[in-house]
Amino acid sequence: MSADRISKLLEDLRFLDSERFALVQELRTIILGLDSGITEEVKYGGILFSAEKPFCGVFSYAKHVSLEFGAGASLPDTFQVLEGEGKFRRHIKLSSPQDITDKHVRAYLLLARTASGKP
């Protein structure tokens, strides 16, 4: 059931905006490649990723894709790219594939996964 929901969400996104679809797919590849135990599910209008506990989500908006961290406020923001001022959550806005490199997405994903209790 979860795979069907993911496929449907991605199909809808591809229809609406091929560039955001490609960005989401690239993020999915990176996130799922971190560990064979990572799972994904559609939740809150995006894709939530878990390694025993949820550690990030990918959400597509009208002009960008957001990589969101539920416990992002506790992550060290070495590269000063985390946005948000809430008590817990932080996110990284991505508008192009180059942003994935420029904003050090992989480093933040590794930090978030480790912080969620999965080394």
Image (spheres, rainbow, N blue to C red):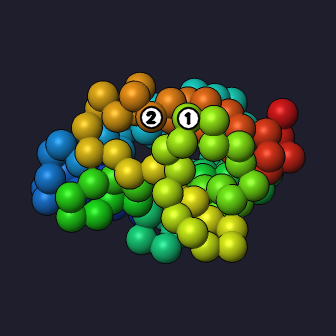
Q: Nearer the viewer, residue 81 or 5?
A: 81
Question: How dense is the environment of label 1, judged by Cα within 10 Å: few (below 14), some, or many (20 and up)?
Answer: few
Q: Quadrant of residue 33?
A: top right
Q: Amino acid at mark 1?
A: Phe
The secondary element bearing badge 1 is classed as: loop
At 46% from the left and 50% from the top, the residue drawn is 92
Q: Which residue is mark 1?
A: 79
Residue placed under numbered mark 2 in the picture = 103
Label 2 residue SS: loop
Alpha-carbon span between mark 1 and mark 2: 7 Å
Horizontal and vertical percent position of residue 61: 29, 63
Say what amino acid the circle numbered 2 marks: Lys
The C terminus lies in which quarter of the figure? top right
- Compared to 90, does 29 lie above or below? above
Tell me: 73 left or right of 47: right
Q: Residue at x 27, y 54 (%)?
A: 64
Q: Nearer the viewer, residue 39 or 27?
A: 27
Task: Tell me the residue at 86%/46% (across/down).
Answer: 117
- Vertical placement of 111 versus 48: above or below? above
The answer to whether residue 2 shows anywhere in this view is: no
Q: Are marks 1 and 2 in contact (CB under 8 Å)?
A: yes
The picture places residue 39, in percent across and down from the top left corner, at: 63, 47
Q: Please indicate whether residue 114 sits to the left or right of residue 41 in the image.
A: right
Query: Which circle's residue, 1 or 2, is located before the other in the chain?
Result: 1
